[in-house]
Image (spheres, rainbow, N blue to C red):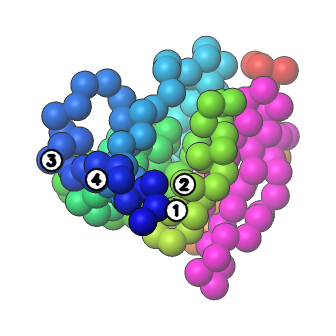
Amino acid sequence: MSNLDLLVRYTYDDYCLWQGDWELIEGIAVAMAPAPMRIHQQVARELFLALNQEALEACECEILYETDWKLANDTVLRPDIILVCGDENEKYITKAPKIIIEILSPSTAKKDETLKFNIYEAQQVKYYILVYPDDLVARVYKIKNDRYIKVGDFSNETLTFHDIECDLSLDFDKVFRKFR
């Protein structure tokens, strides 16, 4: 018996009763970090606004900010920003998003770079973007043959998404410009 076997396992019903900000990963409650630093919030806002404007003009998908994604009865994640298409559930997302963006902070980096990376890859999220606000760089991964491959590191470049339900572009130079 491992130490993990001794942990209490929770469900979505338990999760709904909790105060504060949590994620639920395979039945284990994971407290979210305290309110992010201002640059984290500002970069998230710029990314959200840039993608939202594109999505409003190009497709019927939604850009959402910190919305629960219920993967299973024992797993609920809350990515920073997602693009989801055709999900009608009002309480939480039920389909794998096409794009997930996580803005990293020192307290979340390891979880975002490993645990969430593996979950998003297994769920076949088409694009996973890790944003490093202190470095003003975004590391972009794309699903190919059921695995993430690194597309590149973006700081001044524009990334165009041709293979989701609509054509979108994300101009990282414009997003990061005011923080340089």
Q: Which image quarter is the N terminus in? A: bottom left
Task: Read off the magenta span.
Answer: 127-156
Taking the spot 69% from the left edge, 30% from the top edge, the residue there is 106
**Mark in the foreground, 1 or 4:** 4
The answer to which of marks 1 and 4 sits earlier in the sequence is: 4
Q: Position of residue 13 (x, y in %)?
A: 15, 47
Q: Which mark is residue 120?
A: 1
- Estimate how packed mark 1 is, as few (under 14), some (14 to 19) or many (20 or more) residues with alpha carbons within 10 Å: many
The answer to which of marks 2 and 3 sits earlier in the sequence is: 3
Horizontal arrangement in the rendering, residue 41 relative to residue 179 (left or right): left
The answer to which of marks 1 and 3 sits earlier in the sequence is: 3
Q: Which mark is residue 6?
A: none
Q: Which mark is residue 9?
A: 4
Q: Which image quarter is the C terminus in? A: top right
- Hey, what amino acid is under mark 1? Tyr
Let me know if residue 138 is in the magenta part: yes
Let me know if residue 128 is in the magenta part: yes
- Hey, what amino acid is under mark 4? Arg
Taking the spot 83% from the left edge, 31% from the top edge, the residue there is 135
- Estimate how packed mark 3 is, as few (under 14), some (14 to 19) or many (20 or more) residues with alpha carbons within 10 Å: few
Q: Secondary structure at mark 1?
A: helix
Give the spatial CA distance, label 4 vs label 3: 12 Å
In the rendered image, the residue lying farthest to the front is 1
Give the spatial CA distance, label 1 vs label 3: 23 Å
Give the answer, above or below, for where 42 lies relative to 86. above
